[in-house]
Image (spheres, rainbow, N blue to C red):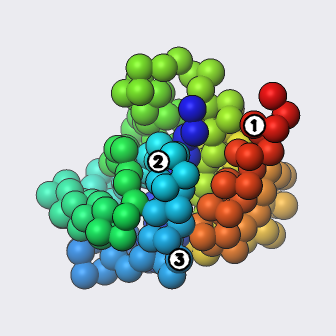
Amino acid sequence: MKLVFLDRDGVINKFPGNGKYVTKVKNFHFIPGSLEAIKNMTDAGYTIFVVSNQAGVGKGVFTQTKLDQITARMLRDIEKSGGKIREVFYSTARSDAGCQDRKPNIGSIRKAVQLLKKDMHVVKNAFFVGDTVTDMATGRNAGCRTIFVLSGRSDRERLREKKIKPDYVAKNLLEASKIILNGYAEVKKKR
């Protein structure tokens, strides 16, 4: 099964800044190339999930309704460009809430796998694309291959500080999608 898990802010859309959130539809802006990347992965037969922490809801910075509106707009624009996201999983819990869906925990990935009626073995060839140390830890915790993109919150220096080594580093989601599309071909050849 061809699976990709994507973080949202800094991967699909522009990162709003440390301690800030995308709180309105008008503040959601796709990173150049991200729509093309999602379309290319969709066309290649990948099932794509979004896994994102959105603690701004839990902190009362914005409402669940606003988050739902932003998500609906994101999905509509993705579908208009020929891409498909199977499901979006958010943890809206604050970091101190102990939520199993909040990254680096893998509750959301488990839910995605259950939605597919599979077991966790399907993630061993999956990719997790993110822009933070937490995203890389999430991918590792689930057993995915990890791709760190430089289009969001963190940079290579932060990865080195935390001694996190992703499987791949890419400039953005479009470059990551090229790694994924080539990587899957390599995995198939090795079997």
Q: Tell us which disc is closer to us: 2 or 1.
A: 1
Residue 160 or residue 171, whichever sits in front: 171
Tag in front: 1 or 3:
1
Q: In the rendered image of this protein, does residue 110 appear above or below residue 8?
A: above
The residue at which mark 1 appears reads as 188
| Distance between mark 1 and mark 3 Cα atoms | 26 Å
Earlier-in-chain disc, 1 versus 3: 3
Provide residue 91's location: percent of width, then percent of height: 37, 44
Q: Position of residue 54 (x, y in %)?
A: 37, 55
Q: Is residue 150 left or right of residue 82?
A: right
* Residue plotted at (80% across, 45% down): 186
User: Cα distance, mark 2 to mark 1?
Assistant: 19 Å
User: N-terminal of the two: label 2 or label 1?
Assistant: 2
Q: Could you tell whether 184 is left or right of 81 in the image?
A: right
In what quadrant of the picture does the C terminus appear? top right
Q: Residue at x 41, y 20 (%)?
A: 117
Q: Percent x, y for residue 35?
A: 45, 70
Of the residues shown, which amino acid type is indicated by label 3?
Answer: Gly
Q: Quadrant of the N terminus?
A: top right
89 above or below 20?
above
Q: Amino acid at mark 1?
A: Lys
Dot 2: element: strand
- On screen, residue 144 versus residue 51, left or right, reads right
The span from disc 2 to disc 3 (Cα, nearest Å) is 16 Å
Give the vertical position of 60 relative to 87 (above or below).
below
Sequence-first disc among 2 and 3:
3
User: Which mark is drawn over residue 48?
Assistant: 2
